[in-house]
Amino acid sequence: MNGTIIDSETKNPIEFVNIGILNKNKGTISNLNGEFNLSVSKALLNNSLTISHVSYYTIKIAIKNFKDQTISLEPKTNKLSEVIISNRKKRNRKIGVKSYNPLLWLGAISEDIDIIENAQRINIPDTSVKVKYINIYLRSGFKSDSSFIRINFYKNVDNKPDEKIVFENIVQKKKIEPGWLQIDLTKQNIYLEEDFFIGVEFIPDFKNKLEVYIGAILTKGKGYSRRNSQGEWNKLQGASTINVEIEY
């Protein structure tokens, strides 16, 4: 199956759209021109393709009815959250996994043209918090390069990532090398009032194979991972080394 995904209003291509069969661990992601290619086995022909992007409404297309085509997605309406102004002195805190085991790591780039997403549960104080930075520890063993990184926020339901709760497409291109990598979200003005999961996607290079490894730890077992777009979340025995810096 080949296709191009475009904005229904502007007709511009949409990059980094997640395309796959829900919970079947078979998927891909659109490239910078909105194009994708996906092959599936005959055993999956009775399923549907789920096509989703945080800034657009999700659609499904029956695989049997699919033909090489241009697919239009309808943009979501932006809803602004209430912001409370206060003159109280702000506190800053780092929450999540701040340590790592030098012998453990998690893959962060799929060998296919798809994503691997690692998520970590974040328990916040009993108040509204502003998310300022995401910190990710990258283990040694790969060559320095650059990559697009997408940050997702998920509702915590029964201690598992559920629906997305921040509807902004947060993608940054960063130089990646072993050590701590920081994603600056200060300009996004993200305020949350309940515990959540933070998800990190390293967008694959569509020309050359890129390897990235996130640090990990066996304790603090609040981590999840999925290996494909629209794939099923799997609970980790431990957690990936991801933390957030908040202000409250």
Image (cartoon, rainbow, N blue to C red):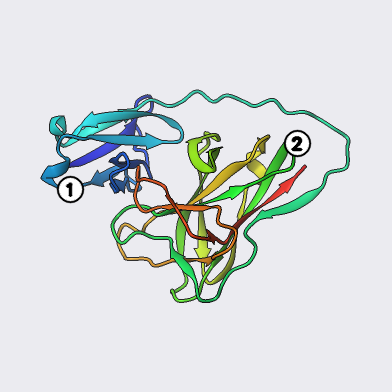
The spot of residue 194 in percent (x, y) is 65, 36
In the image: residue 27, left or right of residue 154:
left
Q: Residues within 10 Å of mark 1 (few under 14, many from 20)?
A: few
Q: Amino acid at mark 1?
A: Ser
Inspect this view and state whether residue 210 appears: yes
Q: Is residue 118 visible?
A: no
Upstream in the sequence, badge 1 or badge 2?
Answer: 1
Q: Are marks 1 and 2 in contact (CB under 8 Å)?
A: no
The residue indicated by pointer 1 is 39
Marks 1 and 2, Cα distance to the nearest angstrom? 46 Å
x%, y% of residue 84?
77, 28
Please identify the quadrant where the N terminus is shown: top left
Given the current orientation, which residue lies at the most extreme left position? 42
Total marks shown come to 2
Q: Which numbered circle lies on residue 127?
A: 2
> Residue 169 at x, y = what percent?
49, 40
Residue at image point 88% right, 35% down: 87
Taking 49 as reference, is 228 left or right?
right
Residue placed most toward the observer, 152 or 169:
152
How would you rate the neighbour count of disc 2 (Cα within 10 Å): few for under 14, some for 14-19, many for 20 or more?
A: few
Q: Please tell me whether mark 2 sits on a helix, a strand or a loop.
A: loop
Residue at screen point 51% across, 64% down: 175
119 lies above or below 100: above
Q: At 43% from the left edge and 60% from the top edge, which residue is drawn? A: 108
Mark nearest the camera among 1 and 2 is 2
Location of the C terminus (image quadrant): top right
* Residue 187, image x, y percentages: 65, 43
Secondary element at tag 1: loop
